[in-house]
Image (cartoon, helix red, strand yellow):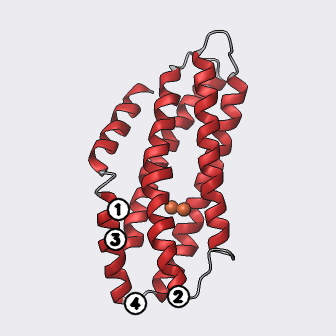
Amino acid sequence: MKASEILKKEHRVIERLIGLLRKAVKDMEQGKEVNMEVFVRCGSFITAYSDQKHHGKEEQIFFELMEDYGFDKNEAPLKDFLEEHDQARAYTIELRKAAFQMQDDHIKKPEELIAQAHQSFDLLEHHIHKEDENLFPLADSKFSDETQEKLLKQFKEFDDNFPEEPLLKKLDDLEKMV
Ligand SMILES: [Fe+2]
Ligand SMILES: [Fe+2]
């Protein structure tokens, strides 16, 4: 398995999370009672899985090695991808904030939470699509076999700090809540 395939597999996990959040948001839009705990826990999951584990590997390893092949983090396309990671992290913080506010009976702002959630979904889906279809195939067309091996080794070391199984268990539990 190539490093880019590991990243693509993680994209599918992030899409599962978006799917369940979309369902919760739709219920809210239809005026149904939604347990705010779902949003709070989804926010924690996005932070751990997407912002730290996934984007961490891309930024600290994958993009880093792309620089050895003439790509520059200060120029397109890497610059755009990095800016979107920052934007995604900022949206996650706002989403969690909106969910906490909703949990407080005195400050109910469903429209804020709904708008925030849609912004996050759109950004992540667009970003994932561009990586799967453009950036990863481009990088793979340049990487040597040696680089591919190096990537896998570094991914494994990085992921020791972010084990997949407990995170997937959390996602399973979240899917049962909506
Ligand atoms: Fe990314
Ligand atoms: Fe990604």
On whether ligand 2 comes within 8 Å of the CB at mark 4, the answer is no
Sequence-earlier tag: 4 or 1: 4
Secondary structure beneath dot 4 equals: loop
Residue located at (48% from left, 27% from top): 38
The CA span between labels 3 and 2 is 17 Å
The CA span between labels 2 and 4 is 10 Å
Pointer 3 with pointer 4, Cβ within 8 A: no
Viewer-nearest of labels 4 and 1? 1
Q: Residue type at mark 1? A: Phe
Residue located at (42% from left, 71% from top): 4
Q: Residue type at mark 2? A: Tyr
Pointer 3 with pointer 2, Cβ within 8 A: no
Residue 147 image offset from top left, x and y in percent = 38, 84
User: Residue 166's image quarter?
Assistant: top left
In the image, residue 85 sits, relative to residue 138, either above or below, namely above
Pointer 4 with pointer 1, Cβ within 8 A: no
Sequence-earlier tag: 3 or 2: 2
Mark 2 burial class by Cα count in 10 Å: few <14, some 14-19, many 20+: few
Look at mark 2 in the image and give the residue it sits on: 69
Q: Is residue 59 visible?
A: yes
Look at mark 3 in the image and give the residue it sits on: 154
Mark 3 burial class by Cα count in 10 Å: few <14, some 14-19, many 20+: some
Residue located at (37% from left, 65% from top): 6
Of the 4 image quadrants, the one containing the C terminus is top left
Viewer-nearest of labels 2 and 4? 2
Tell me the tag on residue 144: 4
In the image, residue 146 sits, relative to residue 91, either above or below, namely below
Look at mark 1 in the image and give the residue it sits on: 158
Sequence-earlier tag: 3 or 4: 4
Is 168 left or right of 114, judged from the image as shown? left
